[in-house]
Amino acid sequence: MNIPKNLRYTASHEWVREETDGTLTVGITDHAQCLLGDVVFVELPPLKKHIEAGKEASVVESVKAAADVYSPVSGEVIATNPALNDNPALINTSPYQEGWIFQIRPENNTVNALMDADAYAATT
């Protein structure tokens, strides 16, 4: 299982990458996409939507199930991944790069409160 050391993680299997401008890029982990199987549709969150930490931001549908994707922090959605509209399987083939789901401008910097790679690995 691939768990990059430079990311932060949630117990609900989202990953978070802090960008140089302080925004956060969010997706689901390799573990989560393996459990889901072939992803066939992604419901992206609306731009400019305010989402509270731990609340549903997106839905990922696979041939097996649909899974909610939760926001790891409170903030405003500033971007979504348009490539997922045409190719939702990017979540399977490149969960940490091309398969990102949304970007959020956090209300405050709580990213360090999320799990590091070692802590996340211990939960999977």
Image (cartoon, rainbow, N blue to C red):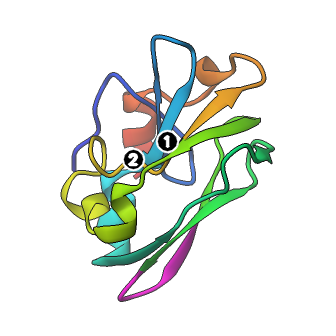
Q: Is residue 55 above or below residue 6?
A: below
Q: Which residue is mark 2?
A: 100
Residue extending farthest to the top is 20
Give the SS element for disc 1. strand
Q: Is residue 19 left or right of residue 86?
A: right
Q: Residue at x 60, y 62 (%)?
A: 58
Q: Residue at x 29, y 67 (%)?
A: 34
Q: Is residue 8 left or right of residue 6?
A: right
- Amino acid carrying label 2: it is Trp
- Amino acid carrying label 1: it is Val
Q: Is residue 83 left or right of residue 15?
A: left
Residue 22 visible from this viewpoint: yes
Q: Is residue 122 above or below residue 88?
A: above
Which mark is on residue 65?
Answer: none
Confirm whether the magenta stretch covers residue 63: yes
Q: Which residue is mark 1?
A: 26
Q: 8 or 42, which lies in front? A: 42
User: Magenta residues?
Assistant: 62-68
The image shows residue 122 at horizontal and vertical percentages of: 41, 41
Q: Residue at x 37, y 41 (%)?
A: 121
Q: Residue at x 28, y 68 (%)?
A: 87
Confirm whether the magenta stretch covers residue 100: no
The picture quadrant where one finds residue 56 is bottom right
